[in-house]
Amino acid sequence: MISAQLIRDGHDPVVLDMPALRAKRTRAEIQAQHWQCKFCGKDMTPRMGAIRAWYFAHKREASECPFEAESEKESPQHRILKRTAAEALRRHFGDQVASLEYEVRFPNIKRIADAVITLKDSTRVAVEAQLSPLTLHQLQVRTESYLSDEIEVVWVFLEQQGGGLRDNGLWDKCREWLLDEGYLVLTARASTVETAVPLPTLPE
Ligand SMILES: [Zn+2]
């Protein structure tokens, strides 16, 4: 997960997210603090590698965490997609944005959105980054459940290398429906960056 709850003696728990922490705190500072899952209250470990984006993981098997059941399956790719999409939308809405939160639970509809952007006029926009296959019917049901809770939703899809969405046109149908209905849709392009690192010449 991108967000976690910071637990300190004598303070109320506060929810923070890794991108903000990474900009302000060192690895050792983050490691030294006590983190809990904001959904199930179990301890979390910050994972802070040299290459991959930093995140929080449950310390032990978290089979009873609502996060498992109510959000898209967490993978490195999904974390990157939800974060880049949320950041892109924050830029899109510019100074209309009041706040950006990651992993927000809506108990009425039993759903944890990947991110929620709240605008200054109180509009709430859920970000749904979709990597696993979803039928048009499932997408419609989920979209309508957000609307019934007065939350706007922006779907994010990943374009394949070479163009088109995954799963034999299933998602193209979803995207087409959303655009016909007037929704804002984000399509992220997957790209792989390979760099050749020149090795120094060894002395004779
Ligand atoms: Zn949890």
Image (cartoon, rainbow, N blue to C red):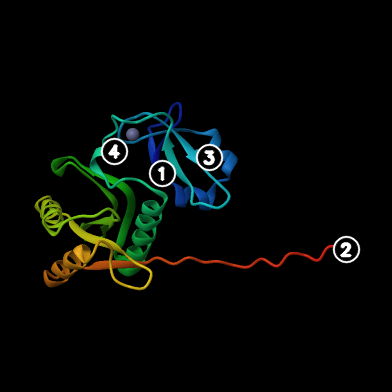
Which residue bears the numbered disc 2? 203
Q: Please, what secondary structure does the residue beneath circle 3 have?
A: helix
Q: Earlier in the sequence, mark 3 or mark 4?
A: 3
Which residue bears the numbered disc 4? 68
Which amino acid type is marked by label 3?
Ile
Q: Where does the N terminus fall, quadrant-wise? A: top left
**CA distance separating discs 1 and 3:** 11 Å
Say which residue appears at 23% left-offset and 42% top-offset: 70
Q: Nearer the viewer, mark 1 or mark 2?
A: 2
Q: Quadrant of residue 93?
A: bottom left
Q: Where does the C terminus fall, quadrant-wise? A: bottom right
Which residue bears the numbered disc 1? 16
Q: Earlier in the sequence, mark 2 or mark 3?
A: 3
Label ID, residue 111: none
Label 1 CB-ligand 1 distance < 8 A: no
User: Where is residue 71 shown, x and y percent of the image?
Assistant: 26, 45
- Above or below for 105 versus 166: above
**CA distance separating discs 2 and 4:** 55 Å
